């Protein structure tokens, strides 16, 4: 199964920046203990999808932020 990128460059940059911010918040203890695990999980998802350029939820709903001419 081949995954086509379905995220634009801006979408990917936003995901990576927010992921890094969440990692910083979790690592410095800004987030309370029970929510730390959720923040780490969301950060990991954002960083992975931002780096790869493919979002499974976008694929399920047949949504893409990439332009059609690429």
Image (tube, rainbow, N blue to C red):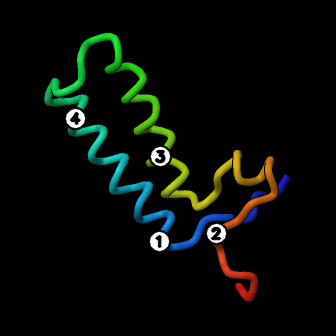
For marks 4 and 1, give the CA distance.
22 Å
Q: Quadrant of residue 15?
A: bottom left
Above or below, 19 against 29 in this view is: below
Residue that carries the numbered disc 1 in the rendered image: 10
For marks 4 and 3, give the CA distance.
14 Å
Residue 58 lies, in percent from the top left, at: 71, 53
Q: Secondary structure at mark 3?
A: helix
In which quadrant of the rendered image does the C terminus lie?
Answer: bottom right
In the picture as drawn, the residue positioned furthest to the top comes out as 34
Residue that carries the numbered disc 2 in the rendered image: 65
Residue 12 lies, in percent from the top left, at: 49, 63
For marks 4 and 2, give the CA distance.
28 Å
For marks 1 and 2, give the CA distance.
9 Å
In this picture, residue 25 sits left or right of residue 51: left
Q: Secondary structure at mark 2?
A: loop
Dot label at residue 46: 3
Q: What residue lies at 50% left-to-right and 56% top-to-bottom?
A: 50
Q: Secondary structure at mark 4?
A: helix
Which of the two labelled residues, at mark 4 and mark 2, occupies the earlier sequence position?
4
In this picture, residue 69 sits left or right of residue 7: right
Query: Which of 34 and 5 lies nearest the eye of the viewer?
Result: 34
Residue 56 lies, in percent from the top left, at: 70, 47
Mark 1 near mark 2, Cβ–Cβ under 8 Å?
A: yes
The residue carrying pointer 4 sits among few (fewer than 14), some (14 to 19) or many (20 or more) residues within 10 Å by Cα, namely some
Dot label at residue 25: 4
Mark 2 near mark 3, Cβ–Cβ under 8 Å?
A: no
Q: What residue lies at 85% left-to-right and 52% top-to-bottom?
A: 1
Q: Quadrant of residue 6?
A: bottom right
Q: Secondary structure at mark 1?
A: helix
Which of the two labelled residues, at mark 1 and mark 2, occupies the earlier sequence position?
1
Above or below, 54 against 20 in this view is: below
């Amino acid at each position: 199964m081949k995954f086509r990128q379905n995220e634009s460059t801006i979408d990917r940059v936003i995901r990576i920046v927010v992921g890094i911010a969440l990692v910083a918040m979790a690592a410095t203890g800004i987030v309370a203990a029970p929510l730390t695990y959720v923040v780490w999980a969301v950060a990991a998802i954002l960083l992975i999808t931002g780096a790869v350029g493919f979002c499974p939820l976008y694929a399920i709903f047949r949504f893409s932020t990439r332009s059609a001419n690429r």
